[in-house]
């Protein structure tokens, strides 16, 4: 998402909050709304799970996160 923002001449913030990045992407391209669920599901892992002891993930959570990441990656790569 940050690469997309840079390509749009938007300085991306220093954040791991995917919802904040989504908000910025939507200002440039409304089609990002189609993958909001992927952003929302991954945001937990980007911003919270990275700190030990706060929240944990099981194998099903990880599989879902990988699937969402692949969907998001494919979508964003299609913008270039």
Image (cartoon, rainbow, N blue to C red):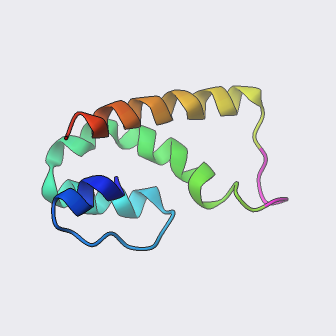
Q: Residue at x 17, y 60 (%)?
A: 27
Q: Residue furthest right?
A: 53
Say how many tags the image has.
Answer: 0
- Between 34 and 65, which is closer to the camera in this rendering? 65
The percent position of residue 68, horizontal first and vertical second, equals: 48, 33
- Between 61 and 8, which is closer to the camera in this rendering? 8
Boundaries of the magenta span? 52-56
Q: Residue at x 36, y 60 (%)?
A: 21
The percent position of residue 57, horizontal first and vertical second, equals: 75, 40
Q: Main secondary structure of the magenta part?
A: loop
- Between 39 and 11, which is closer to the camera in this rendering? 11
Quadrant (top left, top right, bottom left, bottom right) of the C terminus: top left
Q: Residue at x 45, y 73 (%)?
A: 14
**Residue 32 figure quarter:** top left
Picture layout, residue 32 above or below residue 20 = above
Indicate left or right for 53 with 17 as reference: right
The percent position of residue 65, horizontal first and vertical second, equals: 58, 35
Magenta segment includes 18:
no
Indicate left or right for 25 with 62 as reference: left
The percent position of residue 33, horizontal first and vertical second, equals: 25, 43
**Residue 48 figure quarter:** bottom right
Q: Residue at x 43, y 38 (%)?
A: 38
Picture layout, residue 5 above or below residue 73 = below
Picture layout, residue 18 above or below residue 30 = below
Indicate left or right for 59 with 43 as reference: right
Indicate left or right for 56 with 16 as reference: right
Picture layout, residue 7 above or below residue 14 = above
């Amino acid at each position: 998402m940050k690469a997309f923002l840079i390509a749009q001449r938007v300085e991306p913030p220093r954040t791991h909050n995917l919802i904040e990045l989504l908000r910025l992407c939507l200002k440039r391209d409304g089609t990002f709304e189609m993958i909001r669920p992927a952003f929302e599901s991954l945001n937990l892992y980007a911003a919270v799970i990275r700190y030990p002891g706060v929240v944990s993930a099981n194998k099903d959570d990880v599989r879902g996160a990988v699937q969402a990441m692949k969907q998001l990656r494919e979508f964003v790569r299609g913008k270039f």
